[in-house]
């Protein structure tokens, strides 16, 4: 069982919006930039992201083998609304009436106890609308960091340009986590959902 995206979120920003104020992105093809925006957003948020939040509004389905006792925690806050609670009983799918359960911040609770059943599917929408500027800024920084790796040899320690000078790169283990990555983590650190 697990968490499945039923309806993906809209892109957090367009290529033009990402390029605004980011000269390093000015020469990138908009299709490539759209892919980088999607990859950075997925790395940070959603079911595969490290933040533990839905960035843009999306429909999710939590799949469980059976109903647990008590409330059911819904991953990827902020939760916008419940869509449905469906389960299998007696070989047939049953959709619970919306009046039998309620959303409580980041969990769903039955008003009169969960029924007996298996193959539980809980659909809900989660995410920001609008997406906060701090999240957009972090995604834009991450896109810029990924874009800077295009065409650069990661093992290169020194580059000499005749008549101009040279550039030295720190390729040590400490330098692998760039200042940009640390800035993204610092921007979003207060939003990170920690699970126990």
Image: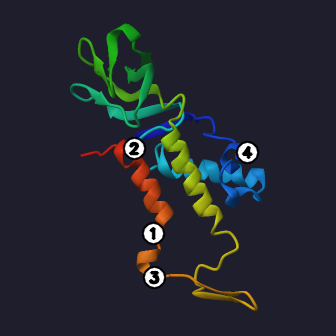
22, 96: nearer the viewer: 22
x then y, percent, for residue 166: 65, 87
Residue ID for mark 1: 177
Residue occupied by mark 2: 52
Q: Residue furthest front?
A: 164
Q: Secondary structure at mark 1?
A: loop
Q: Nearer the viewer, mark 1 or mark 2?
A: 1
Seen at 38% across and 36% down, the residue is 75
The residue indicated by pointer 3 is 172
Q: Residues within 10 Å of mark 2 (few under 14, many from 20)?
A: many
Mark 1 in CB contact with mark 2 (< 8 angstroms) = no
Looking at the image, which residue is at 48% across and 32% down?
127
The residue where tag 4 is placed is 16
Compare residues 196 and 131 and report the one nearer the observer: 131
- Residue 9: x, y in percent? 58, 35
The image quadrant that residue 108 belongs to is top left
**17 with respect to 86 (left or right):** right
Secondary structure state at the residue bearing disc 3: loop
Task: Say which label, 3 or 1, has the lower sequence index.
Answer: 3
Which quarter of the picture shows residue 91?
A: top left
The answer to whether the residues at label 4 and label 2 have Cβ atoms under 8 Å apart is no
Gap between marks 4 and 3 measured at Cα: 34 Å
Q: CA distance from mark 4 to mark 2?
A: 27 Å
Q: Earlier in the sequence, mark 4 or mark 2?
A: 4
Q: CA distance from mark 4 to mark 1?
A: 27 Å
């Amino acid at each position: 069982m697990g968490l499945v995206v039923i309806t993906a979120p809209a892109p957090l920003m367009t290529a033009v919006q990402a390029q605004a104020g980011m000269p390093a992105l000015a020469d990138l093809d908009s299709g490539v930039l759209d892919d980088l925006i999607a990859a950075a957003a997925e790395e940070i948020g959603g079911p595969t992201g490290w933040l533990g939040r839905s960035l843009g509004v999306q429909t999710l389905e939590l799949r469980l083998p059976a109903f647990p006792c008590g409330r059911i925690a819904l991953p990827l806050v902020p939760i916008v609304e419940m869509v449905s609670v469906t389960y299998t009983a007696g070989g047939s799918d049953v959709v619970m009436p919306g009046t039998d359960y309620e959303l409580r911040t980041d969990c769903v609770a039955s008003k009169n106890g969960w029924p007996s059943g298996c193959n539980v599917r809980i659909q809900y929408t989660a995410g920001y609308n609008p997406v906060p500027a701090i999240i957009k800024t972090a995604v834009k920084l991450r896109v810029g960091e990924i874009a800077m790796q295009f065409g650069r040899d990661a093992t290169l320690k020194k580059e000499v340009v005749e008549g101009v000078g040279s550039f030295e790169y720190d390729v040590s283990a400490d330098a692998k986590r760039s200042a940009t990555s640390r800035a993204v983590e610092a921007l979003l650190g207060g939003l990170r959902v920690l699970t126990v």
